[in-house]
Image (cartoon, rainbow, N blue to C red):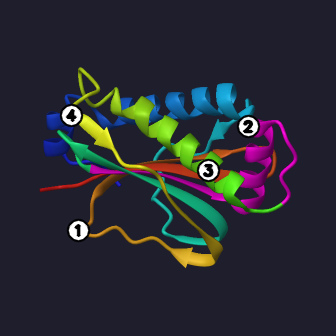
Amino acid sequence: MTLSNGLLSSLHSNEELLIQQLMYDVREIFNTMVGLQDLQPLPVKVEPVTNFKDCISSLIGMAGTYNGLVSLHMPSCLAIRATSSMLDMEVTEVNDDVSDAMGEIANMIAGSFKQHLTTSGLDVLLSTPSIVHGKEYAITLRNNPEQIAVRFTTDDDWFMVAVAFEIE
């Protein structure tokens, strides 16, 4: 999962700093918008997970100076709990509210993280969220993009945020 020197040079950064920035963005958003405050990152360098069981994934495309994908992957039960907290209402199943909330969370993460990639923030455009959920599914990215990924734990669950960079 190590980012290449060429990519890091074009980003004017290093992998450790990018991971720290991503962790900060995720914690800040989950603290202020979702109400989950005690997020603990698991070991910093993790391989992105591609196969999911009973999860919901939200994907945000990046296009512009840097192309790629920001993704949020969360077990359905945690997504329901996060949505309930975020909307301050009881949610008991994966429904449109959960899909909308997961899309909005991923959008906020992508919006925050893109600020670390450009000086103006206008050099990278974000797509609308795409949501995938189900009992069992896989997400495959073409062309073997370079990625960073961070897993977080809550009291009894984990979720993952990953950023993939398209290599030309």
Sequence order check: which comes first, mark 4 or mark 3? Answer: 4
Left of 88 or right of it: where is 26?
left
Q: Where in the figure is residue 165, as x and y percent of width and height?
A: 27, 50
How far apart, in angstroms, are the residues tagged by discs 2 and 1? 35 Å
Rate crowding at label 2 as few (under 14), some (14 to 19) or many (20 or more) other CA atoms within 10 Å: some
Left of 53 or right of it: where is 163?
left
Q: Nearer the viewer, residue 124 or 10?
A: 124
| Residue 89 part of the magenta segment | yes
How far apart, in angstroms, are the residues tagged by discs 1 and 3? 29 Å
Q: Which residue is mark 4?
A: 11
Q: Where in the figure is residue 82, as x and y percent of width and height?
A: 74, 44
**Residue reaching furthest to the bottom:** 136
Q: Which residue is mark 2?
A: 86
Examine the rendered structure and indicate whether residue 78 appears above or below residue 107.
below
Q: Quadrant of the N terminus?
A: bottom left
Q: Which mark is residue 124?
A: none
Sequence order check: which comes first, mark 2 or mark 3? Answer: 2
Q: Nearer the viewer, mark 4 or mark 3?
A: 3
Q: Residue at x 68, y 58 (%)?
A: 96
Examine the rendered structure and indicate whether residue 53 appears above or below residue 49.
below
Q: Where in the figure is residue 18, as x and y percent of width and height?
A: 37, 34
Corner quadrant of residue 84? top right
Type of the residue with mark 2: Met
Q: Which residue is mark 1?
A: 143
Magenta segment: 68-92
User: Is disc 1 placed on a helix, strand or loop?
Assistant: loop
Q: Which residue is mark 3?
A: 100
